[in-house]
Amino acid sequence: MKFQVLDILPNITNPVTGREIRPDERFSQALTSARYAEEFGFDAVAIGERHAGAFLSSGAGVLLGAVAATTSRVRIMTGVSVLSIADPLRVAEDYATVDQLSRGRLELVIGKGNELRQLPMFGITNGDQWDALAEKYELLRRLWREENVTWQGRFRAPLDEVTSLPRPYAGAPRVWHGSATTQTSAELAATWGDPLFSANAIQPRDNYTVLIDHYRQRYAEHGHDPRLAYVGAGAGFLFLADTTQQAREAFGPTYEKIVAYFNQPGNHTPGNAMTFATIDDAIARGPVLVGSPQQVAEKILWFHEAFGHDLQSFSLPTMIPHEQQLAMLERLAADVIPVVRKAAPTTLWSDQDPYGGRPAAYGRTTPDAAAEIEKARTSSEAPHRG
């Protein structure tokens, strides 16, 4: 398995201590965490994107540019890029810039976003976000694969012979599809033969398993190479301690106050309330990773039994002092990740994955991974001649 550190930059007051963090400090912490994640051997770092609520991640591409400039090996991902409300031409330009800065380490994760309040801010009517996402992704694919693109659709002005610049570093970056509560993103990922990234954040494991199973079934039905049907999975809050009881006692009051606040009407999208109200229930059955290193490793492998996933994402408990977060990150790398890597191997980003050698840091052995995958798919579909 591979491992990612995700930060969606929540900017909330600690509900127990009242501690607040200034925006400039919060940005600095996000960049420092990314550098330490690389130092500790994580495989990827990601920045989320939100435009409503108490988050500071509206400029995710800017932050990822800073991550690209201050790291050298770690993969750089979004979590997610809210393509449904964005201009795909700007997304193509901005993230190709990050791809060039990182010399090919970018992998984009797209989605419709789970915050309804941001839709009218960008002129998208509630109910149109799925159609907007599908249309805009089709255009993004073309902009990263073609020059002199002419195009017309519902959700942006027409294009006439447009070539987006800069071009990506080595062919189109890989795109993953974020999936939270419906089959729509899983279907879009399967249609195009792209990987899926399950939120696995607030609901029971079985809810996400249904979406992942649907994705794999439809991926195969579309005739894509099943070896490349990679799956990522998020998690709820992370909190490590020497024992699970210590973690429960240290983090439980904060967790339960956050859940109570989040589940109030108006503080979440209808249908997306947090299922596990108590810390004990969340540890036992929910997606949180709270406990001893052994407990957390076992919990990830419990996810893996159901998901068969290749990439596990972690979100640090950003409401505690940053020094404690970094110590937790180091302990995660030392005491949890080696156990899970050994128990759940994957070919993601290996020499069996066309994107494994795309970045300069990994030899740039694949000059255009997207074209290589498309060529293999086309060849498999061609009629065999005796």
Image: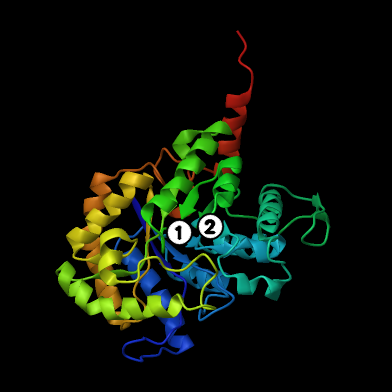
Among the 4 quarters of the image, the one containing residue 120 = bottom right
Residue found 45% across the figure and 41% down from its top: 353
> Which of the 4 image quarters holds residue 223?
top right
Instruction: Check disc 2 and report its element: helix, strand or loop.
Output: strand
- Is residue 71 something one can see in this rendering? yes
Tell which circle, 2 or 1, labels the residue nearer the N-terminal end. 2
Q: Position of residue 68 (x, y in %)?
A: 48, 66
- Residue 109's disc is 2
**What's under tag 1, amino acid-wise?**
Ala
| Residues at circles 2 and 1 in contact by the CB criterion of under 8 Å | no
Q: Is residue 363 above or below residue 68?
A: above
Type of amino acid at the residue the image marks with label 2: Val
Q: CA distance from mark 2 to mark 1?
A: 11 Å
Name the mark nearer the viewer: 2 or 1. 1
Residue 208 to residue 93: above or below? above
Where does the C terminus fall, quadrant-wise? top right
Give the secondary structure at mark 1: loop
**Looking at this view, is 22 or 197 the one in front?**
197
User: Which residue appears farthest toward the top when viewing the image?
Assistant: 386
Q: Which residue is mark 1?
A: 199
Question: Of residues 93 and 381, which is closer to you in this image?
Answer: 381
**Percent position of residue 201, x then y:** 41, 62
Q: How many other residues sit within 10 Å of disc 1, few (<14), some (14-19) or many (≥20)?
A: many
- Residue 178 appears at what percent x and percent y? 52, 56
83 on left or right of 238: right
**Can residue 230 be seen by looking at this rendering?**
no
**Relative to 14, residue 342 above or below:** above
Residue at image location 25% in from the left, 71% down from the top: 328
